[in-house]
Amino acid sequence: MAREIKRSKQATKNIILATQHTVAGTTQVTPEVIEVIAQIATQEVPGVYSMRGKLSDHFTNAFGSNARGKGVELTQTDAGLMIDAYVFLQYGVAVPKVALDIQNAIQSQITSMTDLNVVQTNVHVSGIVPEKVSNQFDPDNLFGETETTEVAD
């Protein structure tokens, strides 16, 4: 059974990237960087309305800062990374197709940017957002009165 390490604030461990160079030293990224990559990749998929936020994200946004990695959870295993993406989709999309596009986008971006192995990408559809109905009222004519033009004889 693969050992899993769920990322938490107390036990944030940087991920060391493999390099093919003979230069001494390492390249490390924080798990938050991986989460941001997955978030951006997800948001660029057509049909995704937004990512699900956590309660802490609402407090963070209220104080003027952006929530990084919003809607993404990262789990490190011996075999590689497991990514969970929590999304709201636009009404009318083919859910399985958009979910597959999200999985492919996340795996492609993380692999190309970090060369890390993503062993599993789970998409959790948290909701469907209907189309916004545009306001049909005229702010200059709030009561819907029709204008009549008087014609002088």
Image: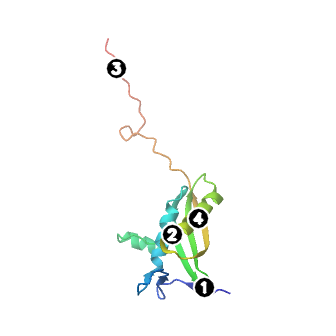
Marking on residue 150: 3
Report, in whole angstroms, how far the alpha carbon at label 2 lies from the one at label 1.
Answer: 20 Å
The amino acid type of the residue labelled 1 equals Asp
Instruction: Answer yes or no: is residue 83 visible.
Output: yes
Q: First in sequence: mark 3 or mark 1?
A: 1
The amino acid type of the residue labelled 2 equals Ser
Residue 75 coordinates in the image, percent (x, y): 56, 80
Estimate how packed mark 2 is, as few (under 14), some (14 to 19) or many (20 or more) residues with alpha carbons within 10 Å. few
The residue at which mark 1 appears reads as 78
- Kind of element beneath mark 3: loop
- Which residue is depicted at the point 51% across and 69% down? 112
Residue 40 coordinates in the image, percent (x, y): 47, 65
Between marks 3 and 1 in the image, the one whose residue lies nearer the viewer: 1
Report, in whole angstroms, how far the alpha carbon at label 4 lies from the one at label 3.
Answer: 64 Å
Question: In the depicted view, which residue is nearer to us: 53 or 43?
Answer: 43
**Quadrant holding the N terminus:** bottom right
**Quadrant holding the C terminus:** top left
Between marks 4 and 2 in the image, the one whose residue lies nearer the viewer: 2
